[in-house]
């Protein structure tokens, strides 16, 4: 069973930036879609970025222009650059593999927390 492990979360001031990383224990080349999701307390988990094996990306309106997803298949890694963070971005961020444009795959990491203070 492949495992995903996120890192890079932390406490950041509003307007600041973070770079999240996700490393897989095995090859991610076979996964067409990889994505980042987030879940804030009391809210449902939502996708914030996805990327196909061909490099096509997708973002919801809430983060488009501020977040950038990328992947490095050779290093078995997925990244998420978060810029211009605001308090609404505070959540636990998860790496996901094997999903579609609209639904997550079965593989999840344990999450990395992002906290934004004014």
Image: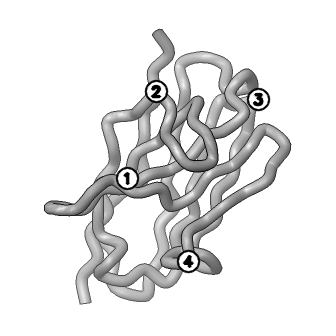
Badge 3 local density, few (<14 within 10 Å), some, or many (20+)?
A: few
Q: Along the horizontal axis of the image, is 117 left or right of 34?
A: left
Label 3 vs 2, first from the N-terminus: 3
Decide which of 78, 49 is in the foreground and name it: 49
Query: In terms of secondary structure, where does tag 2 sit?
Result: strand
Image position of 108 with respect to 51: above or below: above
Label disc, if present, on residue 107 of the rendered structure: 2
Label disc, if present, on residue 61 of the rendered structure: 4
**Mark 4–mark 2 distance (CA, rounded to whole Å):** 25 Å
Tag in front: 3 or 1: 1
Task: Identify the residue under disc 3.
Answer: 74
Q: Quadrant of residue 30?
A: top right
- Identify the residue at image location x=15%, y=62%: 42
Label 4 vs 2, first from the N-terminus: 4
- Identify the residue at image location x=50%, y=32%: 105
Label disc, if present, on residue 103 of the rendered structure: none
């Amino acid at each position: 069973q492949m495992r995903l492990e996120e890192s890079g979360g932390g406490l950041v001031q509003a307007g600041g930036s973070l770079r999240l990383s996700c490393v897989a224990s095995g090859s991610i080349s076979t996964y067409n879609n990889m994505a980042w999701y987030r879940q804030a307390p009391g809210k449902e988990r939502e996708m914030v970025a996805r990327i196909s094996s061909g490099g096509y990306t997708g973002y919801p309106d809430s983060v488009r222009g501020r977040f950038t997803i990328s992947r490095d298949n050779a290093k078995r890694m997925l990244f998420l650059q978060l810029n211009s963070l605001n308090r609404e971005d505070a959540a636990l961020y998860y790496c996901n593999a094997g999903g579609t444009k609209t639904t997550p795959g079965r593989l999840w990491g344990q999450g990395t927390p992002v906290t934004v203070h004014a």
